Image (cartoon, helix red, strand yellow):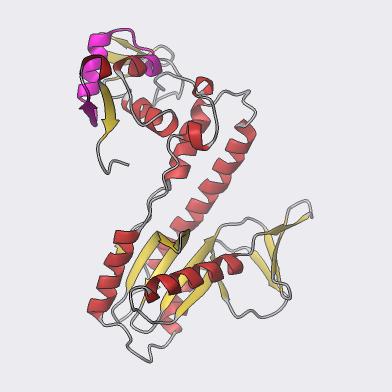
């Protein structure tokens, strides 16, 4: 049973927003674009794995949780996917790396072969997996739970894999995961169905959602380099203006009344965790204070303070 779905990571959401609004000549732009590409690819690979796992329907009780981040001994560790069964827990490390991958032993290395023929050593997902197994083991011990913790590395798509030797850690493609998990025998019931449910809810309760907002601070980008304006959803230009009780695009003539809401979300992701009426008008390039007050009142925000000290904030648990 699926207990936790995967949501788009906050860092990826923030990068999408930042890439749209960052000055084209900013010194960090190339780095931001590259990170956005890599994180989009990683998230896409994880979604592909999730899709494949919908085929896993064993007869025994189980729990599947995607994207769980816990804290143990002062250390955060994030697991792409967890499968809880009566006999074992399986952590899956999902990778989406284009091209040919060569896997060596002694030492274990993952080498990506680029189309040009250049070979690039990448961080070993096996080492990442072993680290997460270690911390999850300690996390469970604190709760007096003792159960084997296994791990697999799953490549989202059909890379050309060349494994020079066999490895203790199972390496497979995402589409193979359901069949592989079904092939593992359940020889001993360590956890009952009730235990599995209780553990799944405990994992969800202790999940630590990474919050990189505002990105101007976490990415060390001055807010002045982040472009204001309401972006047209039709032509993607910064050309929406408020006129006659609606937003209208001066470029493609698209019109609507909710087009400022993505700009508000961008503000909280990129600039700061509160917004004044004046800041709303700056970021949406609106002149009328009264109209700004009405639009803010209809937004999914809470008004705090009063008069000159009034500001708007996101509602609790809003993401």
Residue sitting at x 66%, y 65%: 160
Q: Along the horizontal axis of the image, is 84 left or right of 45?
A: left
Q: Along the horizontal axis of the image, is 210 left or right of 289?
A: right
Q: Along the horizontal axis of the image, is 18 left or right of 4?
A: right
Q: Nearer the viewer, residue 71 or 125?
A: 71
Q: Is residue 118 above or below residue 162?
A: above
Q: Along the horizontal axis of the image, is 14 left or right of 309?
A: right
In which quarter of the view is residue 109 placed? bottom right
* Residue that lies at the very extreme toward the right in this rendered image: 117
* Residue that lies at the very extreme toward the front in this rendered image: 73
Q: Is residue 103 above or below residue 232?
A: below
| Stretch in magenta | 281-305
Q: Is residue 161 above or below residue 314?
A: below
Whether residue 29 is visible here, answered yes or no, is yes
Give percent across and percent down for residue 143: 33, 74
Let me know if residue 273 is in the magenta part. Answer: no
Q: Nearer the viewer, residue 286 or 269?
A: 269
Whether residue 245 is visible here, answered yes or no, is no
Residue sitting at x 59%, y 65%: 125
Give percent across and percent down for residue 8: 41, 48
Q: Nearer the viewer, residue 295 or 183?
A: 295
Quarter containing the C terminus: top left
Give percent across and percent down for residue 215: 47, 35
Give percent across and percent down for residue 21: 50, 26
Total numbered badges shown on the rendered structure: 0
Quarter containing the N terminus: bottom left
């Amino acid at each position: 049973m699926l207990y936790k779905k995967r949501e788009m990571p906050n860092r990826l959401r923030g990068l999408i927003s930042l890439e749209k609004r960052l000055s084209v000549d900013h010194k960090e732009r190339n780095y931001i674009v590259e990170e956005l590409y890599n994180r989009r690819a990683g998230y896409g690979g994880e979604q592909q794995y999730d899709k494949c796992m919908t085929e896993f329907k064993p007869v025994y009780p189980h729990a599947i949780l995607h994207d769980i981040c816990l804290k143990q001994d002062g250390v955060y560790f994030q697991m792409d996917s967890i499968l809880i069964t009566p006999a074992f827990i399986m952590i899956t490390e999902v990778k989406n790396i284009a091209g040919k991958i060569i896997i060596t032993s002694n030492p274990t290395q993952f080498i990506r072969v680029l189309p040009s023929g250049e070979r690039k050593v990448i961080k070993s997902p096996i080492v990442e997996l072993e680290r997460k197994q270690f911390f999850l083991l300690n996390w469970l011990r604190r709760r007096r739970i003792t159960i084997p913790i296994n791990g697999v590395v799953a490549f989202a798509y059909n890379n050309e894999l060349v494994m020079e030797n066999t490895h203790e850690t199972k390496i497979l493609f995402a589409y193979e995961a359901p069949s592989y998990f079904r092939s593992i025998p359940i020889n001993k019931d360590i956890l009952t169905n009730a235990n599995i449910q209780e553990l799944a809810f405990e994992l969800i309760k202790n999940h630590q959602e990474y919050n990189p907002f505002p990105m101007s601070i976490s990415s060390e980008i001055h807010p002045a380099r982040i472009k204001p304006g309401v972006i047209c959803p039709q032509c993607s230009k910064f050309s929406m203006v408020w006129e006659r009780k609606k937003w209208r695009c001066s470029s493609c003539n698209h019109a609507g009344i909710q087009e400022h809401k993505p700009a508000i979300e961008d503000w909280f992701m990129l600039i700061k965790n509160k917004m004044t009426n004046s800041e709303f008008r700056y970021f949406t390039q609106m002149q009328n204070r009264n109209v700004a007050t009405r639009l803010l009142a209809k937004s999914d925000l809470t008004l705090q303070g009063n008069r000159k000290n009034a500001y708007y904030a996101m509602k609790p648990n809003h993401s």
